[in-house]
Amino acid sequence: MRGSLISAPFLGYLLKQQAKIRVANVIMTEQPLTKEGNIEMSQKLCDNQSVVNLCDITAQLIPAARLLPQQQLFDQFVRENKFDQQTPIIFFDEYIHFAARAWFTFRYFGFKKVFVLDGGYSKWLNHQSEEFQEQKIQDQPRFQGRIMSTTEVIKISQLKSLKDPKGDDWAIIDTRDAIRFKKGSIPGSINIEFSEYLNEDNTLKSDEELKQLYERNGVDINKTKIINTCQTGKLACIATIAQEILKTKQQILYDGSWEDWKLENRKK
């Protein structure tokens, strides 16, 4: 495990040992799902896995797309799907995109024991179980995490008036692809595409490679407070996981991201 990432071999070990965990396939669809539909859309990783539809833990599309939900909506979702804060939850999707957003959402609402399958379902299908040595289980970190705070989700009003009295610098990182970034971006933002955080097998790059990635883009992770953005606030969560692993000061998400910024500026 690295921070909130869990490797496919280690997950395989936990499943083999019948550890008390929840495994959740994260999807995103506006269409209502029947029980049969859940099964059809779900990638089969293990028996009794859950399905988390991001649309069910997202606020209404007005005024901006894909904002975090209100507490009441999230609590209702948790009750209906019987999630609890004591049982570790491991999110996955085809790669890591949707799972990262689900991880951030649950952490924001107080869940400590939430994780993302490194490399996603595609890595799971291609991993070798012998990569994990059972005798080294004592070297693996215990399931642990910390609760996000409201300061780690920034709003547009805060973004427009960033002045740190302590003199720390800010950096706005846009994780969209270069084509979208060139079509329009938040003034002063730096484009570090989400794919640059990942290896070819969609696992997160090493700590050293991530540090070098920020250095190449002029971001000092030891001094700079980073605000992560993308189109709506989904892919930016991949950068948030990377920063958690690198132990940056904070992992801040601009909820609504570029869509929210465009909406605010259209009002003028």
Image (tube, rainbow, N blue to C red):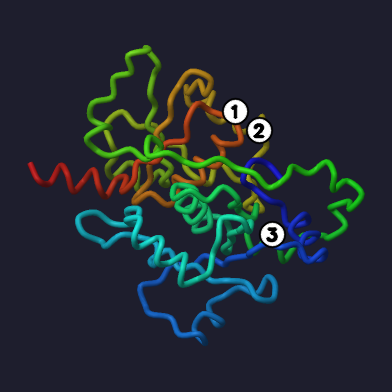
Give residue 5's position: percent from left, percent from top.
Answer: 64, 47
Q: Residue at x 63, y 59 (%)?
A: 87
Which structural element holds mark 1?
A: helix
Element carrying mark 2: helix
The amino acid at mark 3 is Lys
* Residue on which the image places disc 1: 211
Between the C-alphas of marks 2 and 3, the distance is 19 Å
Q: Is residue 5 above or below residue 246?
A: below
To which residue does mark 3 refer? 123
Marked residue nearer the N-terminal end (1 or 3): 3
Foreground pick, 177 / 262 = 262
Residue 233 relative to residue 162: left or right: right
Depth order, front residue of 100/22: 22
Q: Tell which residue pokes out farthest to the right in this image.
A: 135
The answer to whether the residues at label 2 and label 1 have Cβ atoms under 8 Å apart is yes
Query: In which quadrant is the N terminus drawn?
Result: top right
Res 63 quadrant in image: bottom left
Q: Residue at x 78, y 44 (%)?
A: 140
Say which residue label 2 marks. Answer: 207
